Image (cartoon, rainbow, N blue to C red):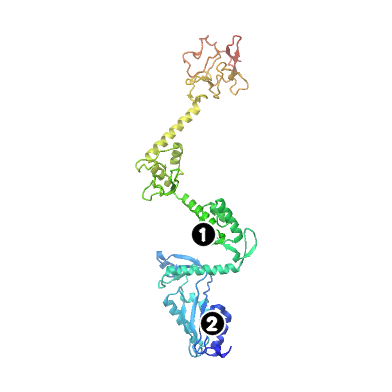
């Protein structure tokens, strides 16, 4: 190095600066002059053995107030800068003239560090800039005692640091930049195409740390947004997809700025934003839509009222629950599906919040009355199913008190079978019971205690619901002779035969 490039200091100082230039490169900047002392600055990164949690306040977690809870986890702290001037008699007689610049240390902490650095020079009166840089990089945090022994450890930002909230943002931004630089220098295997690519061609999801190449993500996101599946615009990993199905959006979240840089398509990003906002509104319990067909605007319920909604577009006031025009809080909504509401209200699995919502909408007294009525109606239907039959023509309920299973409906005069509800031919109603292929074959008197065979006229309904109970022939035809006395041996069945004159007669089979 020529004399014109040297400063006013000695050879030892100049040799130190040459060596530091080779070590630190762009981190060291020097201004040399033949007529003035050399000045410069050295940017020293502070090494972290493990990630730290930022805490605003004291390093003692038990002494921290509620407003000083841990904030974010970082892996890189902003560097400490040494600004110095080399005097002519450095290092034998004078120390470097210097100052420290560090935004995350308080003035008292900086003063303590300055005193310690001067003490390092005073020990040997030798070149000391490299020793200082090594101390700041590896021993600074331990020297100040501002890192806790927790897991993970925490870095306390002193109360004396001005504008601590803005400082935390600056530290987080620096940490993000450093992580990005490291990420871009590494190589990663894409989980979609399985190719190894440099970080500059990849994207890492902050929440789950999964890495995929940008080309695959662009294709995947474009397809999902085009099809309207905005819930899947996130990490394609199987575990993250499962979390998305369970509505854990923190795992799959992707910032809009990141999506914008990935896709580089304003229309596609706008569609994603619109659909995402729509999905978010649909998931809110206080959001509905205007019931007017020509409006259908999104409406958020008035927070001061339990049921009132006012459309911001057409100013229509309506009820949040029934969508009818506003009927006031003293008039309750009409219940549509009584059984559904009664079941939900009386179910032991219905949450207390849902019960309160139902009572707000319909009133407790109305719900209790509906529940009682629905229970009574079900009991009635159950009794009918067990003890009666419905006319297959008019659905009228018929209960048989006596007689055979050939019934005549009092309402529509239809003939039907009491056992299977099949319609019967009015001219030959008993053929249904005399046909071997019929499911009711030989079952005319089934269910009749002590039934005996008798002869009936055509059209006679021996089991009619409207028959005269005092008329042993059923009341539909001319009186016939009384049934013969019971045989000594009980019959094994009955059959209907057609006589020569067309009449049908029931005979016992022994």
Residue 191: x and y, percent? 62, 59
Which numbered disc, 2 or 1, marks the residue closer to the eye?
A: 1
Residue 132: x and y, percent? 51, 81
Position of residue 413 relative to residue 178, above or below, is: above
Residue 307: x and y, percent? 38, 46
The quadrant in which residue 459 appears is: top right
Please give left or right for residue 476 compared with residue 186 in the image.
Answer: left
Q: Return the mark for residue 256.
A: 1
**Kind of element beneath mark 1:** helix
Q: Return the mark for residue 141.
A: none
Q: Which residue is mark 2?
A: 130
Front one among 208 and 493: 208
Q: CA distance from mark 2 to mark 1?
A: 44 Å
Q: Residue at x 43, y 41 (%)?
A: 345
Residue 418: x and y, percent? 53, 22
Front one among 288 and 20: 288
**Kind of element beneath mark 2:** helix
Front one among 12 and 260: 260
Please give left or right for residue 24 compared with residue 346 in the image.
Answer: right
Q: Residue at x 44, y 32 (%)?
A: 377
Question: What residue occupies the far left of the structure in this picture?
Answer: 330
Q: Is residue 57 visible?
A: no
Position of the C terminus by quadrant: top right
Q: Residue at x 57, y 69 (%)?
A: 182
Position of the N terminus by quadrant: bottom right
N-terminal label among 2 and 1: 2
């Amino acid at each position: 190095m020529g004399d014109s490039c040297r400063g006013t200091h000695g050879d030892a100082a100049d040799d130190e600066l040459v060596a530091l230039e080779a070590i630190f490169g762009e981190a060291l900047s020097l201004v040399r002059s033949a007529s003035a002392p050399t000045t410069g600055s050295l940017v020293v990164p502070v090494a972290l053995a493990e990630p730290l949690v930022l805490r605003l306040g004291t390093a003692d977690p038990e002494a921290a107030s509620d407003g000083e809870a841990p904030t974010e986890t970082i892996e890189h702290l902003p560097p400490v800068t040494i600004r110095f001037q080399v005097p002519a008699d450095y290092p034998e007689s004078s120390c470097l003239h210097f100052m420290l610049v560090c935004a995350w240390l308080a003035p008292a902490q900086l003063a303590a560090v300055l005193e310690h650095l001067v003490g390092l020079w005073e020990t040997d009166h030798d070149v000391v800039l490299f020793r200082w840089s090594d101390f700041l990089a590896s021993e600074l945090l331990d020297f100040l005692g501002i890192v806790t022994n927790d897991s993970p450890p925490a870095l306390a930002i002193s109360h004396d640091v001005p504008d601590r909230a803005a400082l935390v943002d600056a530290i987080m931004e620096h940490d993000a930049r450093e992580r990005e630089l490291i990420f871009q220098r590494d190589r990663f295997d894409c989980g979609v195409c399985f190719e190894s690519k440099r970080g500059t061609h990849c994207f890492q999801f902050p929440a789950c740390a999964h890495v995929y190449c940008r080309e695959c993500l662009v294709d995947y996101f474009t397809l999902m947004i085009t099809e309207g599946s905005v819930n899947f615009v996130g990490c394609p990993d199987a575990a993250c997809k499962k979390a998305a199905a369970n509505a854990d959006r923190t795992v799959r979240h992707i910032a809009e700025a990141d999506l914008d840089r990935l896709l580089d398509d304003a229309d596609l990003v706008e569609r994603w934003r619109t659909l995402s906002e729509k999905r978010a509104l649909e998931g809110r319990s206080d959001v509905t839509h205007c019931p007017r067909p020509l409006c259908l605007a999104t409406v958020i319920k008035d927070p001061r009222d339990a049921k009132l909604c006012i459309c911001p577009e057409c100013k229509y006031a309506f009820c949040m629950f029934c969508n009818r025009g506003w009927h006031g809080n003293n008039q309750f909504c009409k219940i549509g599906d009584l059984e559904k509401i009664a079941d939900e209200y009386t179910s032991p699995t219905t949450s207390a919040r849902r019960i309160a919502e139902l009572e707000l909408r319909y009133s407790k007294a109305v719900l209790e009355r509906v529940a009682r009525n629905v229970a009574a109606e079900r009991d009635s239907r159950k009794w009918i199913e067990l003890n009666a039959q419905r006319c297959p023509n008019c659905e009228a309920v018929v209960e048989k008190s006596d007689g055979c299973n050939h019934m005549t409906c009092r309402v529509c005069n239809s003939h039907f079978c009491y056992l299977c509800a099949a319609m019967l031919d009015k001219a030959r109603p008993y053929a249904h019971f005399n046909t071997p292929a019929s499911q009711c074959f030989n079952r005319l008197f089934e269910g009749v205690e002590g039934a005996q065979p008798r002869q009936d006229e055509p059209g006679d309904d021996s089991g009619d619901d409207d028959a005269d109970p005092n008329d042993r022939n059923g009341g539909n035809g001319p009186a016939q002779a009384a049934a013969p006395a019971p045989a000594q041996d009980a019959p094994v069945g009955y059959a209907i035969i057609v006589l020569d004159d067309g009449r049908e007669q029931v005979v016992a089979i022994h």
